[in-house]
C-alpha cells in the first residue's frame, strides 16, 4: 500500500495531537514502524493496526478518526496542495461532486501507484446525491465524508454529507446541497500563489 | 441557428479574425486578459509578431499559411509564445485559432487566467492540475531522497570512523590508498605503535587504556596538517598519511615531536601513566610505481626495525631493511 496513505495518518495524528500520541498509537496498534515515508510502499495489513492504535489512543471510534483525517487533508496548511488539487475538480461544490468519479483517475495521474476505491456519483434529484465507493481500502468513505464537508465549507456551500453504511465492500455516502452561496467562497486561482509544497 | 461569430466566441475564447486588409475584425474574450485592450480595427501584424514560419510580412504571407500551425506572440507580451492554426475564412481573410500549448502554465501565472478563460473541452486545466500534482509528488520524493542521502552519508561516515578516537578506521584506509594510487602526488606513510600500552590496560584497566588512546589521537591531531589522514588501524596502532610531505628532516621532526608528546607522562584517576611510541616511515619516492600498499608495508617494516632498536624511536625504511619482515638483516633484528 502506498506510503502516502500511512504518512497522511501519521501527519494528522502528529500535527493534531503531538508526536507523543503518534508514538503511543503505534505501540497500541503493535505497529513495527516508527515513522512512515510518503514515497515508499508498506504492507497493506499495517493500515488496520495503525488505525486501531489511533482509535484506541484517541478514545474515539475509528470512523470519526477517518472523517477527521479527511477534513485535516483539506484544511491543514501542511496539505495546502491537496485543497488546490481538489479545487481543480470543479468551479463550485456541485461540479466538484460530479467530478468525483474522476478522483481515482486524477489521483493515479498525480501519484502512480496510489490506488483509491472506484467512486460512482448519482444525482437522484437536484441537490441530492449518493456516492458509492467500491473496493478498498475500506473506510475510505469516512475519509471522503470529512473531505467533502471541508470542501463544501471551502466553496462557501451549505451541504449535509453522511456515511449511510457499507455493504459487500461498498460504502455509500449521501450528500444534500442546501445552499450553494451560504458563505464566502475561499477562492481559487489556477496559478498557485506560491510554490506548492508537500510534507 | 447560432451565428458563426457567436459560435466562435463560445467555443474558442482565444481566436482572432483578420480581414483581407490585415485588420483584426474580431477576437475571443480571453485575449483581452493578456494585458491588451480591444484589438478590433488594429493591424494584425502590428499587434502580433509571427515567429515561425519566418518572414511573414504581409496579409498575403499569412493567408498562404492556411491550414498550418504558426508560432506567434503578442508584441506587448513577448514572453508567451502562442500556437495558432490558420484557417481561410472564405472571404479573403483568416481565422486564427490560438492556444498556449505548453506555455499555459506561465500564461495562467502571468495573467491570472481562470477555468472560464479556456474552452471546457480544452485540456488546459487538466494540464495545470497535472503540473501541480507532479510538482507536489516530486517535492515529496525529493524530500525523501534528501533524507535518505543524509542518512547514507551519516552511516558512511560512521562506518569509516573509529568510534573511540574519532579518527578514521581501518575500513577508511582502502579508500585513502586508492586515492593515493590515482593521484600523482608524493606522500609518506607513518606507522605508529604505542610502547607499553598493554601494561596500561593490564595495570589500570580498559578505561585508562581508552583515555590513553584519546590522548594520543589529540596529540596526532595537534601535530599534523589538515590534509594529513589519521587512522587508528586497530588496538594501539595508528597510521598517519601525509600527502605531499616527503622531506626527511620535516618527517623526522614530526616523528620526534609526536613521540616526545606521547612520552610525556600524564595523570589518570590519580595514577601517573607513562607510555611511549615507535614510528616506522615509508616514502612513496623510495618505491616509485609500486603503489601505496608497498609504501605502507615499508612503513610497517620500518616500524618493526624501530621497535627492535629500542622504544621511542622513529626509523625510515631503506633498502637494507628488505621488502618483508623475514628479509630484515639479523644484525638489525638482534639489536633489540
Image (cartoon, rainbow, N blue to C red):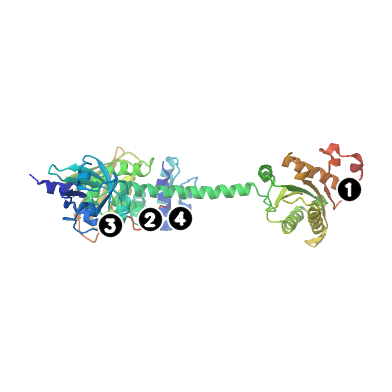
Above or below residue B331? Residue B162 is below
Q: CA distance from mark 3 to mark 2?
A: 27 Å
Q: Chain of mark 4?
A: A
Task: Say the numbered circle drawn on residue B54.
Answer: none
* Chain letter of the residue beneath label 1 in the structure image: B
- The residue at the point 56 percent across, 47 percent down is B152
Nearer to me, B192 or A166 = B192
Circle 1: element type: loop
* Residue B283 as seen in the image, left or right of residue A183: right
What is the chain letter for disc 3? Answer: B
Report whether B265 appears left or right of B335: left
In the image, residue A79 lies at what x, y percent?
37, 54
Distance in Å between CA atoms under marks 1 and 2: 71 Å
User: Which residue has dot 2 on it?
Assistant: A195
Q: CA distance from mark 3 to mark 4?
A: 57 Å
The percent coordinates of residue A134 (x first, y second) are 30, 39
Mark-to-mark CA distance, 4 and 2: 31 Å
User: Is circle 3 on the same chain as circle 4?
Assistant: no
Q: Nearer the viewer, residue B8 or A22?
A: B8
Q: Which residue is mark 1?
A: B309
Residue A157 visible in the picture: no
Query: Label 3 belongs to which residue?
Result: B76
Tell me the SS state at disc 2.
loop
Identified at 40% across, 52% down, the residue is: A198
Q: Is residue B149 visible?
A: yes
**Residue position for label 4:** A21
Amino acid at each position: 500500500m502506498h506510503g502516502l496513505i500511512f504518512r497522511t495518518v501519521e501527519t494528522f495524528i502528529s500535527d493534531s495531537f503531538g508526536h507523543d500520541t503518534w508514538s503511543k498509537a503505534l505501540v497500541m496498534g503493535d505497529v513495527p514502524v516508527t515513522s512512515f515515508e510518503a514515497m515508499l510502499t508498506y504492507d497493506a495489513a499495517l493500515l488496520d493496526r495503525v488505525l486501531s492504535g489511533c482509535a484506541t489512543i484517541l478514545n474515539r471510534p475509528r470512523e470519526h478518526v477517518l472523517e477527521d483525517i479527511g477534513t485535516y487533508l483539506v484544511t491543514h496548511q501542511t496539505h495546502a496542495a491537496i485543497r488546490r488539487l481538489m479545487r481543480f475538480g470543479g468551479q463550485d461544490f456541485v461540479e466538484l461532486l460530479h467530478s468525483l468519479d474522476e478522483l481515482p483517475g486524477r489521483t493515479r495521474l498525480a501519484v502512480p501507484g496510489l490506488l483509491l476505491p472506484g467512486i460512482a456519483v448519482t444525482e437522484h434529484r437536484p441537490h441530492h446525491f449518493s456516492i458509492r465507493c467500491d473496493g478498498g481500502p475500506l473506510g475510505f468513505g469516512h475519509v471522503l465524508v470529512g473531505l467533502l464537508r471541508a470542501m463544501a465549507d471551502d466553496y462557501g456551500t451549505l451541504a449535509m454529507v453522511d456515511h449511510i453504511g457499507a455493504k459487500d465492500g461498498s460504502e455509500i455516502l449521501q450528500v444534500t446541497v442546501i445552499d450553494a452561496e451560504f458563505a464566502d467562497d475561499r477562492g481559487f486561482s489556477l496559478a498557485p500563489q506560491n510554490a506548492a509544497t508537500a510534507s | 441557428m447560432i451565428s458563426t461569430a457567436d459560435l466562435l466566441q463560445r467555443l474558442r475564447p482565444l481566436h482572432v479574425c483578420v480581414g483581407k486588409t490585415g485588420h483584426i475584425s474580431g477576437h475571443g474574450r480571453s485575449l483581452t486578459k493578456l494585458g491588451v485592450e480591444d484589438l478590433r480595427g488594429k493591424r494584425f501584424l502590428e499587434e502580433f509578431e509571427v515567429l515561425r514560419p519566418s518572414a511573414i510580412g504581409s496579409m498575403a504571407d499569412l493567408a498562404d499559411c492556411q491550414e498550418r500551425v504558426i508560432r506567434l506572440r503578442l508584441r506587448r507580451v513577448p514572453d508567451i509564445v502562442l500556437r495558432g492554426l490558420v484557417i481561410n475564412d472564405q472571404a479573403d481573410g483568416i481565422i486564427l485559432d490560438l492556444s498556449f500549448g505548453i506555455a499555459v502554465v506561465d500564461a495562467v501565472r502571468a495573467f491570472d487566467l481562470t477555468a472560464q478563460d479556456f474552452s471546457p473541452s480544452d485540456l488546459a486545466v487538466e494540464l495545470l492540475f497535472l503540473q501541480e500534482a507532479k510538482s507536489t509528488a516530486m517535492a515529496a520524493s525529493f524530500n525523501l531522497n534528501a533524507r535518505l542521502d543524509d542518512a547514507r552519508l551519516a552511516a558512511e561516515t560512521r562506518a569509516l570512523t573509529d568510534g573511540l578516537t574519532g579518527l578514521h578506521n581501518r575500513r577508511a584506509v582502502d579508500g585513502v590508498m586508492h586515492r593515493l594510487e590515482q593521484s600523482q602526488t608524493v606522500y609518506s606513510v607513518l606507522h605508529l605503535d604505542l610502547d607499553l600500552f598493554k601494561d596500561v590496560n593490564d595495570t589500570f584497566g580498559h578505561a585508562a587504556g581508552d583515555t590513553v588512546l584519546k590522548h594520543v589521537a589529540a596529540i596526532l591531531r595537534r601535530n599534523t596538517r589538515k590534509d594529513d589522514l589519521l587512522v587508528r588501524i586497530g588496538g594501539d596502532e595508528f597510521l598517519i598519511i601525509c600527502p605531499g610531505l616527503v622531506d626527511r628532516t620535516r618527517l623526522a621532526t614530526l616523528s620526534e615531536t609526536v613521540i616526545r608528546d606521547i612520552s610525556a607522562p600524564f595523570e589518570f584517576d590519580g595514577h601517573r601513566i607513562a607510555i611511549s611510541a615507535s614510528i616506522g616511515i615509508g616514502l612513496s619516492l623510495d618505491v616509485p610505481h609500486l603503489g601505496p600498499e608497498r609504501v605502507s608495508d615499508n612503513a610497517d617494516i620500518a616500524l618493526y626495525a624501530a621497535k627492535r632498536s629500542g622504544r621511542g624511536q622513529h626509523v625510515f625504511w631503506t633498502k637494507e631493511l628488505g621488502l618483508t619482515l623475514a628479509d630484515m638483516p639479523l644484525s638489525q633484528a638482534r639489536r633489540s
